[in-house]
Amino acid sequence: MDVRLSDAEKVFIIHGVQEGLRNDGRSCGDYRPMYVERGVLATTDGSSRVRIGGTDLLCGVKCELVECEDSSKETNRLEFSVDCSANASPQFIGRGGDAYAEELSDALHFAYDNERSIPDLAKLTLSPNHFWRLYVDIVILQYGGAIIDAAAVAAKAALFDTEIVEVVTRQADEKKMTIDLPQGHLTWKLDVKSAPLISSITKIGSTNVVDVTLGEETCSFAALWVGGSVQKAGTEPLVTMTRQAGGGSLDAASINDMIQMGVNAVGRLDAKLMERLAAEETTIPGQTFLA
Amino acid sequence: MNVLSEHGFRADGRRPEQIRNISCKLSVCPEADGSAYIEQGNTRIMCAVYGPHEATNRAKASEEGCSVSVQLSTAVFATLERKNRRRGDRKTTALARMLEKAFESVIVTSLFPRAQIDICCEIIQEDGSRLSSCINACSLALADAGIPMRGVVTCVTCSSVDGRPVVDISAREEMDTIPRLTLATLSGHDEVVLVEMENRVHMDHLSALMAASHAASSSIHQCLHAALQQHLSQTRAIL
């Protein structure tokens, strides 16, 4: 995470980006090769591992049956948490990564916090006093830039992988309901086709860049996180979240271009990810995944 | 539930004196000075070592030698039950202190006065013998970082069932009432670095338990040693 570049190196990167050339041969709108695996953790209901360049993160989804007084008043069906492991960077030792982790989980929560992201969300409500809560937990094992992009991909892949137990509700005393397991172990899956992805658009010099490496990150002052949900395959994503990150300020005039670039990036990424998720068989439980 | 079946097998099909499968990989974190990933059965741990660097904790800096600080964190999805606390609870802190003490006695600390070594363990999946798997991961990571040690520490948690020692226990066998002995030895020999006992064991059974633990620790040492040798032969310095 701690990359130190001299001024000359920074100028080289900035000038290169302005010409549309980056050090690793990509153009400004290109992602690095991305590896997505799902079903990697045996202790979860759904999981994924995403790698982009040096970035490596794990995501696990756990379902919890919550009993409450009135399930229509409880809104948080999906709960996101991010943890920056100290293995990623010495800066994350102790409580060092907490602020950044919170920023990430907040952005994910915000991107998913609407009816259009997961249309099935109502199916998680089982009875007036029971509902499923899905905990989406992300651990950052290695930090190599584009964390929020990878986190959103991991969350979508893990939710795609998640199998929720089929239960039946029965009437019980005092107008309450009870939950029972039906014959046979049946599971169902959430429809996550329109779950949002997030693209971080970074301003380097006066150019907008997708998926920055650590070196490029040191040359930038501000970034915009754009969350987009693809409602129908092949159409332009619906923007569900925009958020400024990176500390610096952005000129209002340049924001529109950045959002447009983010929307395009999300659209392309989503098409590829859905293709990959549909094609891939899950990893066998118990198989080693970091070898 | 019985730990040993009537035919002398355990729940996962092992014999009492059999350790779990170990697979490991070194230098997994490019950011760290040394790192290792280890799988012992279904326990999966990633460990990174930073340092020796200048002590950040002034109070701990000493002219005599470097201090070792260990951080243990567990992923919230590591066990079947979801845990809300990732780090900093009492049990984890106690384990971290034990790791610190064990490694302070193994690392040749006098070479690095006023310095500090940070060890960070991330438990990705937990299936029993947490302390011993962490120690094994840490010693691989320290070896990868090239920190001078008196030897490679290996550790194993064993139990005694009706007087019969059962080595390298998994979470299923780690029940409340069962006695547990955690033993760390140096280079697979008899030199003991750490002993930790939970619950009570009959005195008559202790010597058999200790002997089995020594044997298991030395077989784990053989595995780790082979992994280190293999890693070194792949990454020979170009001189």
Image: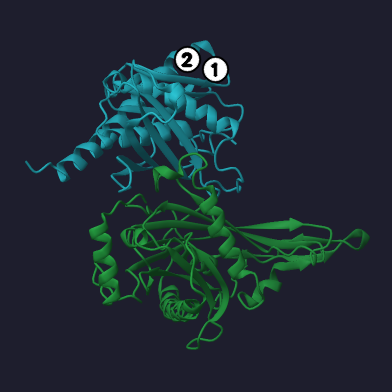
Chain colours: A green, B cyan
Q: Chain of mark 2?
A: B
Residue B42 visible in the current orientation: no
Residue A73 visible in the current orientation: yes
Q: Residues within 10 Å of mark 2 (few under 14, many from 20)?
A: some
Where residue A132 appears, x then y in whole percent?
A: 69, 62
Residue closest to the eye, B209 or A59: A59
Under mark 2, the amino acid is Leu
Where residue A76 appears, x then y in whole percent?
A: 69, 63
Residue contact between numbered discs 2 and 1, judged by CB atoms under 8 Å? yes
Q: Is residue A203 above or below residue A133?
A: below
Under mark 1, the amino acid is Val
Where residue B230 appears, x then y in whole percent?
A: 19, 41
Residue A119, located in which quarter of the rendered image? bottom right
Q: Residue furthest left?
A: B239
To the question of a shared chain for discs 2 and 1, the answer is: yes
Residue closest to the eye, B200 or A159: A159
Q: Earlier in the sequence, mark 2 or mark 1?
A: 1
* Mark 2 and mark 1: Cα distance apart in space: 7 Å
Residue closest to the eye, B147 or A121: B147
Q: Which residue is mark 1?
A: B201
Where residue B84 appears, x then y in whole percent?
A: 62, 46
Q: Residue at x 51, y 34 (%)?
A: B6
Q: Which residue is mark 2?
A: B206
Q: Residue at x 36, y 17 (%)?
A: B192
